[in-house]
Amino acid sequence: MTLTAPDPTPAAPSPNTRLGGRWLTDWRPEDPTFWSSTGRAVAGRNLWASIAVEHVGFSVWSLFSVFVLFMGPEYGVDAAGKFLLTSTAALVGAVLRVPYTFAVARFGGRNWTIISGLLLLIPTVTAAFVLQPGTPFGVFVLLAALVGLGGGNFASSMANINTFYPEGKKGLALGLNAGGGNIGVAVVQLLGLLVIATAGVSSPKLLLAIYIPLIVIVSLYAALAMDNIASVRNDTGAAKLALRDRDNAIMSFLYIGTFGSFIGYSFAFGLVLQSTFGRTPLQAAAVTFIGPLIGSLIRPVGGWLSDRVGGAVVTLWNFVAMAVCTLICILASNAGSLPLFVAGFVGLFFFAGIGNGSTYKMIPAIFQRKAQVAIAAGTPSEEALLNARRISGAAIGLISAVGALGGLLINLAFRQSFADTKSGTPAFWVFLAFYVVCVGVTYLVYVRSNRSDELVTV
């Protein structure tokens, strides 16, 4: 059975919609007339500015995936210590996604985008002073924690952009927003490769000379191009409702498997190549950026595909593919085959990117379906749809926080695996088992029971 969300009565754009102001006091993206005459252009302007800041945020969050390639024996940090540094950045970035989600309601999407962008100056300026041989390991751990500031941007950015778009456009919009941010991982790793290839492993601070001014530029861009939506101001009740919702917990689990895999593998790829196959920093850097680049570029495709065939179906088969790619990595590690291993690992990035887009399409669609149920029970259409946007926006931020913890778990698993066995194979077996569980959960909860977004047609 297919339920169709009723269209609101078309209305002319309200004179209270402030196109040039900082607060939009009338925002009705589900109204076709409003969307075509006003909403599309405003939403697009906010989307591109959001992508710019989130892109730099991801790059900063991923700095230690590059810094560890510069940290030779003179730094006195072994492989386990390097995995601890990437794990610290992953942990702090994940935890910060919770307050960053609330910050949109507290300060406004535009205002918080500017603030969160400028906060990125803290880790980058600090790194300019301490990133050198002889620095105590504890200082590097503190720097890794500060780098985690870049991980929070995603939650606030996605929660904010979710409120700008109608249901039928969210898959692609959220995919572009997230993909544009995710690609910051590949960009910083590619820049790291260029620095190593041209200036050598003794010049990591050249990266900072690029990113410190870039942070200022994108923050200024956000200030000039973005708006706040008045209806989400101080709306902390939506987050409380999302926390109590069963689907919030289930989707958080699935997002650990998609985004957690993407960010965890992004941080660990270079270290795994060095530790498993003895690659030099330059050789590792020459391959490391390929996976995050592919995973980032393909993420909007996951959202676009889910808009057409359903996010749950895409997510289900995606986890099957991730399990197959993990098995390839295990076989390649045991056989000592670098080409096969890289193929399997890049495949993991590819399908993690698809899954990131499909799971994020599922979140607003699930709450849209609940709005339809409420409408059928007598709740006014406008009220039910507004509540769906409110709660799904909060859920997106909270789910992103839990999902990011997957990056921490992956790096800790690799750290323990290499410490115990000098191999990453035991960690890959754990990842394989997890993806199999994700296949089962997706099928039982959202495919077989028809609780997926295939029930929503807009």
Image (cartoon, grey):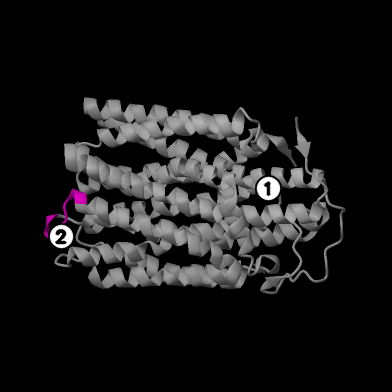
Give the percent coordinates (x, y) of residue 41: 71, 59
* Image: 273 above or below 120: above
Residue at position x 58%, y 45% from top?
Answer: 246
Q: Nearer the viewer, residue 144 or 385?
A: 385
Q: Which residue is mark 1?
A: 169
Element at badge 1?
helix
Q: Is residue 458 left or right of residue 96?
A: right
Res. 347 mark: none
Q: Which residue is mark 2?
A: 75
Figure quadrant of residue 451: top right
Whether residue 286 is visible: no
Which amino acid is tagged 2?
A: Tyr
* Image: 445 above or below 384: above
Whether residue 377 is visible: yes
Distance of label 1 from label 2 (alpha carbons): 49 Å
Residue at position x 52%, y 54% from top?
Answer: 398
Give the percent coordinates (x, y) of residue 19: 73, 69
Element at badge 2?
helix
Residues in magenta?
73-80
Give the percent coordinates (x, y) of residue 448: 61, 27
Residue at position x 36%, y 56% from top?
Answer: 91
* Image: 161 above or below 110: above
Give the percent coordinates (x, y) of residue 162: 63, 55
Q: Magenta residues: mostly which secondary structure?
A: helix
